[in-house]
Image: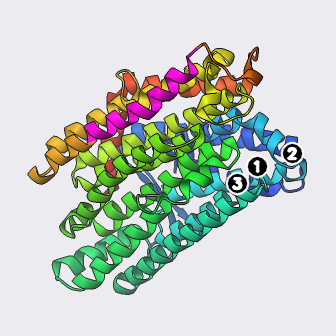
Amino acid sequence: MSAAENFPCFSIVLCMAAGILSTPMKGKQAKWVTLSVVTLVSLLSAGTLLHVLSTGSSFVYTMGKYPAPWGNEIRAGVLEALLATVFSLVMLFSLMGGMDHLFRNIDERKINLYFILADLLLSSLLAIIYTNDLFTGYVFVEINTIAACGMIMIRGSGRSLLAAARYMVMSLIGSGLFLIGLAMLYDITGHLLMENAHEAMERLVQADAYSVPLLVIISFITVGLAIKSGLYPFHSWMPDAYGHSTISSSSILSSLVSKSYIILLIKIFYRVIGFENIVDSKIVNVLFVFGLVGMVMGSVSAIMAKDVYKMIAYSSIAQIGYVYMGIGLGTEAGMVAAIFHILTHAITKSLLFLSAKGLIDASGRKRAFAALQGSAFRNPLAGAAFLTGSLSMVGIPMLAGFISKLLFAMAALGAGPGKVLVTLVVLAVSTILNAVYFLHTVVRMYTPVGAPEGCRGIHLHPSAGTACALLCLILLNFVMGLMSQPVTDLIQFGIGMFA
């Protein structure tokens, strides 16, 4: 076994160990432990990606002495390693960019708890990406949910506690449906390891057995994970959860947590049930419709939002709709577009939340759009970062968001005749709506006159950590936009390894 084949397991264990080690530490000590671990995990994930690219194949890491079908396994291919690398980097930049506000907004006695939750959250994200076992996936979904809920409520304000409660209720509904689906799947296949369950599933499909229970299983798993990821109309928890958390929490929740559930759903579609069987079940058509509705309704809600945080939060609902629309096309091109957009959204949404906080700080800590007038001049780096993220979400060339929308349009052309026109029309409408609310905000923050009385004369310089995070996220956006072909090739290669 190559040393690199230990990296995925070591990354998960390292994050969990960091959470344990941080328990007796003070906030500043826990901060450095977490930042060091997240940096190391990013490097290990990149090393795993290089390893699977050099070998041209995925590998399975058996945990413990029990082999399949009883033991637990980790499986790493190109797609898993790419997702782990990007997610780890976004986690690192989200923590760095919001570090100053963490120490300002959270009780000093709870700072180390925040970093414990961040460690556990990253371990769960990595485990969901790498696991080859369905029940292990469920366990880490729950760890993910609990850690995310803790990161929302740790501020201790009334609104954050209410947001956490709403998030927990919706997440538990989704988790319950997901668990019921897994239990039924185990009942008819007798396996929890993905590959073994897939083999049993293929035999059942060929024998035309359990067709109705299988459809119920697919429905429960899909709806459960769709609720947890915030697909419209299961999105009611998102605006408050994102709008009343610390800035690092908002960035991490919107960029990573919601996407992890979609990634698990994609793994189950491909590696357990079989994507052909998913298409035959017509569940993709349901996802397609809800994705299209989410693209429009999320954007409409963003236009009606009263402050910049809520606007970005509602924008996330629309972007989740894009991902499910791509999956709903039922083609490999649609899946490539959906996964590329997961990466695009992870990078861009983190950039938007972090830069919005800088603009708010330059506006007397007021979120209302009127207070943001001229804020880009009072905090130039935050203004440039928000401009980059906004243009990316609108779909301006050279940025990652443009490539996402281009991939969705090209995938639509290869889908069935009933989906081509409606996809292109809704894609165009959603793009126009994106431009309305993002460019309206950009114009306001670059308007040099009429700044609120309490904001005149303010000129902020971000801390070194915040500046580094914003610059790196801007760079990643341009890299995804200008060098998209290697990324899409990696995604396509990784999807091929899924089977």
Q: Tell me the crowding category of disc 3: few under 14, some 14 to 19, or many 20 or more residues within 10 angstroms, Cα based.
A: many
Contact? badges 2 and 1 (CB < 8 Å): yes
- Amino acid of disc 3: Met
Q: Name the residue: 85% across, 53% down.
A: 110
- Amino acid of disc 2: Gly
Q: Is residue 26 above or below residue 220?
A: above
First in sequence: mark 2 vs mark 1: 2
Q: Position of residue 395 (x, y in %)?
A: 36, 29
Contact? badges 2 and 3 (CB < 8 Å): no
- Amino acid of disc 1: Phe
Q: Quadrant of residue 142?
A: bottom right
Contact? badges 3 and 1 (CB < 8 Å): no
- Say if the magenta span includes residue 118: no
Name the residue tied to disc 1.
115
Q: Point out the stretch of residues depicted in magenta.
A: 427-447
First in sequence: mark 3 vs mark 1: 1
Q: Tell me the crowding category of disc 1: few under 14, some 14 to 19, or many 20 or more residues within 10 angstroms, Cα based.
A: many
Name the residue tied to disc 2.
27
Can residue 408 be seen in this snapshot?
A: yes
Q: How is the image coloured?
A: rainbow
User: What's the distance in space between the residues labelled 2 and 1, CA to CA?
Assistant: 8 Å
Element assignment for label 1: helix
Q: What is the chief secondary structure element of the magenta stretch?
A: helix
Q: Please indicate whether residue 220 sits to the left or right of residue 154 in the image.
A: left
Q: Please indicate whether residue 187 sits to the left or right of residue 353 in the image.
A: left
Element assignment for label 2: helix
- Say if the magenta span includes residue 434: yes
User: Mark on residue 151?
Assistant: 3
Q: Name the residue: 59% across, 71% down.
A: 169
**252 and 116: which is toward the camera:** 252
Mark 2 vs mark 3: in front: 3
